[in-house]
Amino acid sequence: MIEESTNVGTAESHLSEQPEDPRWYAVQTMPRHEKKVSLELQAKDVCCFLPTVSRRRRWSDRQRTIEEPLFAGYVFVRLAFGSPERIALLRTNGVVGLVGVRGAGIPIPEHEIHSIRQVVGSQVPFTERTFLNVGQRVRIRGGVLDGLEGILQSFKGYQSLVVSVQSIQRSVSVTISGYDVEPIPVSSNFAGSHPHRTELS
């Protein structure tokens, strides 16, 4: 399930130059403030993305399914670095700051946000994983995960695709046995080569 706003603020910059194109950034929040921050940002017309996951919680007298943030302590926002929305963001209750050196923020590649959107919106079971930065990068072809890119991993005979957000060092893992996948060649090592598809069993 995804909580997000669809409106992007369009206030004109007071600077003589146009602000840079909007980019995605990770925002660190105070503990258990992700939803509150997301709602307040939406009210300020700041484009935000809060990926959530359904989890069963058990109490002594009952069980309940609740929606929790996929990445505890983080909300994603899309804005231009020098725009008025950035000031509004930093003045939002519960916001610690942008993830990056000295709070300046590190832009997140569009494909990383797209991949997380695709995973949480696909209804395919997934789990949060320890951040990984090794292994072969592959792309799924066909099905609800068509075009999804990530790192291919194998554990106890099960193959999975690990999708990561580099700036916050978080990953999710999707089981992909039976999907048609193709390796993504590294240009420096596979110049002139063509990807081939492999069906995982």
Image: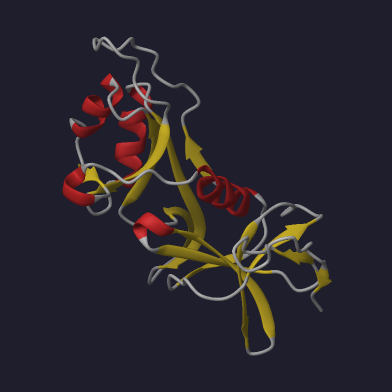
Display colour scheme = secondary structure
Which residue is found at the position 79% from the left and 66% from the top? 179
Q: In the rendered image, which quarter is residue 44 located in?
A: top left
Q: Is residue 116 left or right of residue 144?
A: left
Q: Is residue 107 above or below residue 44?
A: below
Quadrant (top left/top right/bottom left/bottom right) for the C terminus: bottom right
Task: Name the spot of residue 62 as percent of width and height, x first.
Answer: 45, 65
Q: Residue 150, image x and y in percent? A: 60, 63
| Residue 145 horizontal/vertical position (percent) | 71, 54
Q: In which image quadrant can residue 138 be found? A: bottom right
Left or right relative to 42: residue 51: right
Tally of numbered discs: 0
Q: Residue at x 24, y 25 (%)?
A: 88
Q: What residue is drawn where x is 82% and y is 71%?
A: 198
Above or below — where is 192 with respect to 107? below
Where residue 25 sits, quadrant-wise, is: top left
- Left or right: residue 14 versus residue 66 is left
Taking the spot 71% from the left edge, 69% from the top edge, the residue there is: 176
Of the pair 190 and 13, the residue shown nearer to us: 190
Q: Is residue 28 above or below residue 6?
A: below
Residue 61: x %, y % from top left? 41, 68
14 vs 57, left or right, is: left
